[in-house]
Structures are given as C-alpha cells and as structure tokens.
Image (spheres, rainbow, N blue to C red):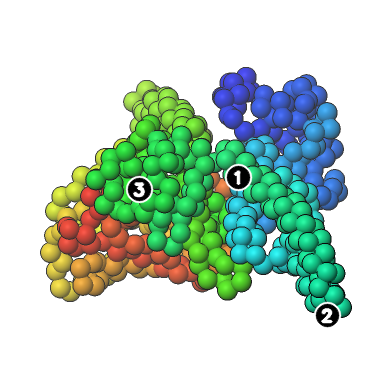
Amino acid sequence: MNNSEIGTLLSFIAEGLVLFDNTGQVTMVNPHASLLLDYTASEFVGKNIDTLFEIYLNDNLIPKSERITHTVFSLGKPFTTPHGNTVYFKSKSGRKFPVFISAKAIKTEERVSGVLIFRDITTEKELENYKINTAQRLSGLTPILQQASTGEFSGKNILVPEKEDEFTELIVGLKLMLDDLGELDRAREKNQFEKIEAVKKTEEERRKLTEQYSKELEGKVEEKTGELKRAKVHIETVIENLTSGLIEYDSLFTVVRMNKTAEEILGVSRNDVLGKRIEPKDIKEKPEWKSLVEVSYPALSQSVQKVSKEASGVDADVTDIMITFPLEREVQVTTLPVASIFSGDSKGFIKAIRDVTRERIIARSKSEFISIAAHQLRTPLSAVKWTMRLLMDGDLGVMNSSQLKLLGRGYETNEKMIQLVNDLLNVSRIEDGRFGYRFNKANIVETITSIVANSAISAREHGINVNFDVPAQPIPPFVFDQEKISLALQNILDNAIKYTPSGGSVAISIVVEEKFVKISIHDTGVGVPKNQIGRLFSKFFRAENVMHMQTSGSGLGLFIVKNIIARHGGEISVESEENKGSTFWFTLPTDESLIPSRDEKVAYY
C-alpha cells in the first residue's frame, strides 16, 4: 500500500493521527489532526513532533526532552495519559484543549516508526465536571431548605464554595438570611427583657413599649419572610429549568417534587403524581405511569444496566434504562439520598433523569462504521490470502527460497489482519446483540481436545508443552454453544502460547462443581502486572509487559471471551503473578435453566 492509499485510509479515522520516524520527524498526518492543531499537512510534515506544538500534563508544560520521541524511542514505552491526570495540547492558534492520547512505536520490515493517536475530549471533560457539580449541589439544596423551614436560623452549617458558580449566589443568600433571622431572634429576647423591666416602672410605659415592639417585630418578620420566599422561588426556578429531569421522593416512594423536564421525558403531569406513592404494581394498573415506575424502580425496565462509578464519574447509584412512553428513549437515572442535616437520618432520595438517546445513537453509529469498514476489508484480505497461497503452493510457477520466505511473511501478516478484522466484527456483533448463539448439547471434553489439537503446531513452533488433563470420570454432554466456547478457549490458549517463553508449559484441566464445570488454563508465561489485572477484559486493552514482546494484537480477544462466558451464564477470572505465569478459569452451567434467556440483558465489559 503506497503513501497515497495510506493517507486516504487515515482520512476516515475520526481521531487525530500522526506518523513520525525515530528522530521525531513527522512523515504523515491525517486531516483530523491538522484540524485539531490548526496546522496544514505541509506545516506538519518534516517538522519535529516534540517542537511543533506544546504538550501539558495538567497545568505543567512537559519539557521537549521528555515528550513523545524520548518516551517512545529512548525509554521504549508508550506515551499515554498517567492515571488520574489530564494531558493538554496547545494548537497553533493558542487553543489549549484536553486530549485522550496514545503514542507508541510500530515496527515494519523496513524501519521502526512512531504513531500518535489523539482525540479532543473537551466535551467529555465539561460534561463530567458539570454532572459532578450539579449532583453535589442538588443533594445540598433540599437539606438547606429543610433547615430553614424548621425555624433553625443558623448559617454555620452552610458551606459557601470557594469557586463561584450558578449556586453560589443562592447559598450565600440563604446563609445571610439565616444569620439575620438568628440575630433577629436574639434581638427579640433582649427586647422582651427590656419590656419586662419597663413594666415594673409603669403600666403606661409597658403598653407603649409593647406596641412599638410589636410593630418593629412585625415589620422585620415580614421583611425576612419575604426574603425566605424569594430564596425559595430562586431555588424552585433553578430546579424547574434544569436540563435534566428531577424527581424528589420521601422514604416511602411518595413523589414530593418534580420539574418540567421530568414531566416531558416521562409523559406525566406533576399534578397527577405529586403526593402519590409510586409502587411496582402501577406499571400495569396505570399504563400512563409506566416510565415513571421504571425510573422509580429501574429493575422493572426491560433494558437495564448498572453504570460503574468509574464510568459515571459520580459517587452515586447510576443506571441506564430504556423507556417507551411517551417516546422510546434511553435515559440515565442517578439516585442520590436526602439526609437530615441534624441527625443524618434518611429523609428520602432524589432521582436525576438525563436523556442519553442521542449519545447512544452516536455510539451505535460508530460501531456500525467499524462493522462496515471491517466487512469492506475482509473481502480483499481473503483474496490476497488465497492468491499468496496459490503462489506458495507453486500453482502459478515454482518459487525460489527467497521468494517463498517473502511470501510466507506476507501471508502471516495477512492472517493477522484477517484475525483483527474478525475480532472487530465479533465485537460489533456482540454490542449489537447479533452474535448468533446456537445452544445445543455437546461434549465439552471433546471440544477442549479438538482445540488443543488445533494448537499443536503453534505450540511446537514456540517450544511450548501443552497438556490437557482429561478427567477420569466422563462428563455427560450438556447445552452450550460449541462454536463460541471453542472461540473462547482458542483465544485463551493462543495467548498462553504466545506469551510463554520457549521451554514453558500450558496445562488445561476441567472439574465439575455442582451445577457448573470449571475449566482452568495455567501457563508459565510472563504474567500480568497486578495494577492491570482489573482492565484485562476491557476492549482494546493490552498489558504493558506483553506489548514489548508482541507489537501486534488487537486487545479484543479477552473482551470477546468474557462476553461469550457471560452469555452462557458463567463467570471468568484470572490469577496472575508477573514473570511467573497466569491461570485463567471460567465456569459453564451444566443446567440449561441457568443460561440467560435471549431477552435478558447481558452487560458488556
């Protein structure tokens, strides 16, 4: 593939991509990178990637000597964003923006080059900060109002944020108002004391003082009551105009408050639901409340998925569900407790409802694009494969040893590309629910034996001894998808062989545990760093230590494996120690009733 064809292919990539040599000199750049950094392609090519634009880690400018070229080639490590930090680029026009970045060395037959891939995450960072700030402020508004409504006029427990935002004026006003009311209360006590003293002197003076005091108190109370009402109106206005729906419940699921956005999303009128207790049975008895009931009890939704704290960015219960009334929408429901500021006892909870339909459509469109691109790649790759096979087999004429060696390398590279395309297609099918499972009774021992036999040549070439400990007691056939489980086993076994040094071993065993079988694959390979085990089954993830051994690899194999096991109703895990080896194990139910039905939601990892 020539540079023109490569440039055309790179122009379809939605992320910024820059290719550079081992001196840092830029050799190729795609249009998205030029657009983000405000440079033309001619201004990029031939320039040093470390001096062309500034790179920051949080607020600190990274020295040129410690940037991409030094990290990738001198240190031999990928240049990525450190955990818990943010990398920023500064464009030619001076715009400083956060990015997701990955730069590493790529090795071809001719030379070692570098590739930088980055994506502008300004919108994600702003959305993350906005969600966190809004959730925190909302959880604090109701307790403040409750304090004021009880007559406890003290602003000591109200913390004014150091950084001014849309809530600052409201919080400061409430604090000042409560302090003023407290001062008024103390003034009233003082006036009462003076009044009693005056009564002792003369009845007339007592009457006059009482009248004067009453008028003053009435005016002050009226003034402070007006301030309190205005503050309440301010809070109500903020809540009413939130872009997210908001519903407040008491501890018995009685609706206390609902804003207009929640009305629009759920298709209900607040006048019909305020003061009403929402119960699971309402989903059938009151069809017009269907979406409200599903938001109140997310587990009742036909499509529900928990969102981890790492993914949501907030310390709260976040759930994605699908509602169908009045319109079909995908919504994200964040649940926050409301506690008494005095006792800490639960007073109910708040649910923030965000319509994420458009975001999900964009994500699915990206997945569809990958699927289409992969399909378009597979056809020419297959044609190349068979053409090279014909040449290697001598069907088109005898080849000399040098030609056969060159063809062999090309054939191997083409096979890796076909495997990558197949992995991309499998991931796309998994995410779209089109992976096509076929559950039938099959013999798991025979399945494992077949996979071990298929891997014999690869194991022999790597100098690895593979042993399957066939159980003494036969395991009766049970229901599973033999093709998909074979794919999962092949992925795990291929990794074990690939990342085990020559002379090592791989041992496979199977045992029956109640209504499950447990299959274990133990190797004496390089292992996985402890701090990366939790990400091992994530999409596109590869451990740092294996990337130095094998530059090729998609990082999709274990993602596919975990979803296959989850669809069967099993579990998968790994125990590993770096430089000593790993043990991957997974379970499969032998009872067909334990396999999730097609309608059940299976989470993607």
Q: Compared to 148, does 513 lie above or below?
A: below
Above or below for 307 versus 346: above
Question: Which amino acid type is shown beneath numbered disc 1?
Answer: Glu
State the mark number for residue 236: 1
**Residue 479, image x, y percentages:** 17, 55
Q: Position of residue 111 (x, y in %)?
A: 67, 38
Labels 1 & 3 near each other (Cβ < 8 A): no
Q: Disc 3 versus disc 2: distance between alpha carbons?
A: 66 Å
Q: Which callout, 3 or 2, points at the residue further toward the start of the chain? A: 2
Residue 200 numbered mark, or none: 2
Residue 557 placed where, x, y %?
Answer: 42, 49
At a point 43% along the width and 60% down the height, the residue shown is: 496
Q: Quadrant of residue 123?
A: top right
Q: For the residues carrying marks 1 and 3, which lies nearer the camera in this image?
A: 1
Q: Secondary structure at mark 2?
A: helix
Task: Determine the secondary structure under disc 3.
Answer: helix
* Chain-order first, disc 1 or disc 3: 1
Alpha carbons under labels 1 and 3: distance apart: 24 Å
Label drawn at residue 293: 3
Residue 102 visible in the current orientation: no
Kind of residue at badge 3: Val
Could you classify mark 3 by the number of other residues whose Cα lies within 10 Å: few (under 14), some (14-19), or many (20 or more)?
A: many
Disc 2 residue crowd, few under 14, some 14–19, many 20+, Cα 10 Å? few
